[in-house]
Image (cartoon, rainbow, N blue to C red):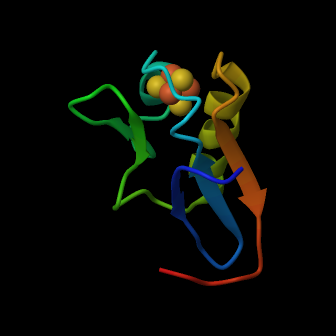
Amino acid sequence: MTAGRVKKTSTWRIEIDASRCQGHNRCYAIAQEVFDVDGFGQAQVRADAPYTEAAKTRAILAANNCPEFAISVVETGVFES
Ligand code: SF4
């Protein structure tokens, strides 16, 4: 994945490939605390997304339901804000 919006934490991060996102809003419907949709219909990771295990579970559910395979939930040990 090369394009998109990235937010990292110490244990996992969410990546949205903006080149794939078609604005179906399924991710937002499934996990509103994690995803938002901008004025152009592109999904974004909320700046205030809670990086809890519950949020991770919902983010994975959203990734599995994204028809464009635009969402990745990636395990990481790297912190970058
Ligand atoms: S479900 Fe996938 S394609 Fe649809 S808005 Fe979310 S990231 Fe984009």
- Image vertical order of residue 74 relative to residue 23, above or below: below
What residue do we see at 20% from left, 31% from top?
39
Decide if residue 30 is in sight here. Answer: no
Left or right placement of residue 75 versus residue 57 in this view: right
Name the one closer to the observer, 10 or 42. 42
What residue do we see at 66% from left, 79% from top?
10
| Residue 79 sits in quarter | bottom right
Number of marks present in the image shown: 0
In the rendering, at what x and y percent does residue 48 appear?
Answer: 34, 61
| Residue 36 sits in quarter | top left
In the rendering, at what x and y percent does residue 75 appear?
Answer: 79, 63
- Residue occupying the far bottom of the picture: 79
- Image vertical order of residue 70 relative to residue 54, above or below: above
What residue do we see at 63% from left, 33% from top?
70
Decide if residue 21 is in sight here. Answer: yes
In the rendering, at what x and y percent does residue 76 appear?
Answer: 77, 72
- Image vertical order of residue 30 relative to residue 53, above or below: above
Left or right placement of residue 67 versus residue 35 in this view: right
In the rendering, at what x and y percent does residue 62 appear?
Answer: 61, 30
